[in-house]
């Protein structure tokens, strides 16, 4: 049932947000020359998939967890996209392809071994990763791997169709946060 909701809601969002997506694409194209950022992430059953995002950082920024990257790597458009969470819009394509759900644990990088171990021990990789979830609503990011893994496991254990729509609604109304950026390295 959740998969059906994922497909229908992703299609509706892509159609309704198409003008915004086009404007964002063009802004980033002008700013960096490369609007869509692709990155290999850990997916369902720890299988690799290519995550799509709008580029928020300068080209050439290392492929690290966001909390390890300097704030100075953000582009002007990227700052706005991260505040509005619009950088995540291309992930609707990941949802349509069946690599992600709208709601689930945020997919991590393969080099985030501490988080992978914590999640693996709690069965977090037994569900599709998501665009939003309980951890994002509680403002828990990948800089606290144990807490993140426990919160993801809690979300999975308590999951229902009601919670699915609750998490989506809270995210749509601006609750939660994305991964923090390292402000100590200049910015």
Image: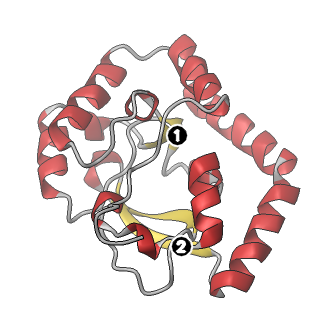
For the residues bearing labels 1 and 2, Cβ distance under 8 angstroms: no
Secondary structure under tag 1 reads strand
Secondary structure under tag 2 reads strand
Name the image quarter holding residue 170.
top right
Q: Which residue is mark 1?
A: 101
Residue drawn at (43%, 73%), measured in percent from left and top? 72
Q: Position of residue 59 (x, y in %)?
A: 50, 85
Name the image quarter holding residue 32.
bottom right
- Give the class, few, some or many, for how many residues have Cα within 10 Å of label 1's Cα (few <14, many ≥20): many
Q: Nearer the viewer, residue 86 or 51?
A: 86
Label at residue 37: 2
Separation of marks 1 and 2 at Cα, in angstroms:
19 Å
Residue drawn at (34%, 23%), measured in percent from left and top? 156
Q: Is residue 82 above or below residue 155?
A: below
Q: Position of residue 173 (x, y in %)?
A: 67, 28
- Give the class, few, some or many, for how many residues have Cα within 10 Å of label 2's Cα (few <14, many ≥20): some
Label at residue 178: none
Residue drawn at (47%, 40%), measured in percent from left and top? 177
Q: Nearer the viewer, residue 14 or 71?
A: 71
């Amino acid at each position: 049932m959740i998969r059906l909701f994922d497909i229908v809601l992703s299609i509706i969002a892509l159609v309704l947000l198409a003008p915004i997506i086009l404007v964002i694409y063009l802004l980033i194209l002008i700013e960096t020359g490369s609007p869509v950022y692709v990155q290999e992430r850990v997916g369902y059953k720890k299988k690799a998939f290519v995550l799509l995002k709008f580029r928020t950082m300068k080209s050439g920024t290392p492929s690290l967890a966001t909390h390890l990257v300097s704030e100075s790597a953000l582009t002007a458009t990227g700052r706005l996209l991260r505040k509005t969470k619009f950088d995540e819009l291309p992930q609707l394509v990941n949802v349509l392809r069946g690599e992600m759900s709208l709601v689930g644990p945020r997919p991590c990088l393969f080099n985030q071994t501490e988080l992978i171990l914590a999640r693996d021990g709690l069965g977090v990789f037994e569900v599709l990763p998501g665009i939003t979830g309980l951890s994002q609503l509680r403002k828990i990011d990948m800089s606290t791997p144990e807490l993140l893994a426990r919160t993801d496991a809690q979300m999975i254990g308590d999951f229902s169709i009601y919670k699915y729509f609750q998490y989506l609604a809270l995210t749509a109304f601006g609750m939660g946060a994305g991964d923090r950026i390292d402000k100590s390295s200049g910015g």
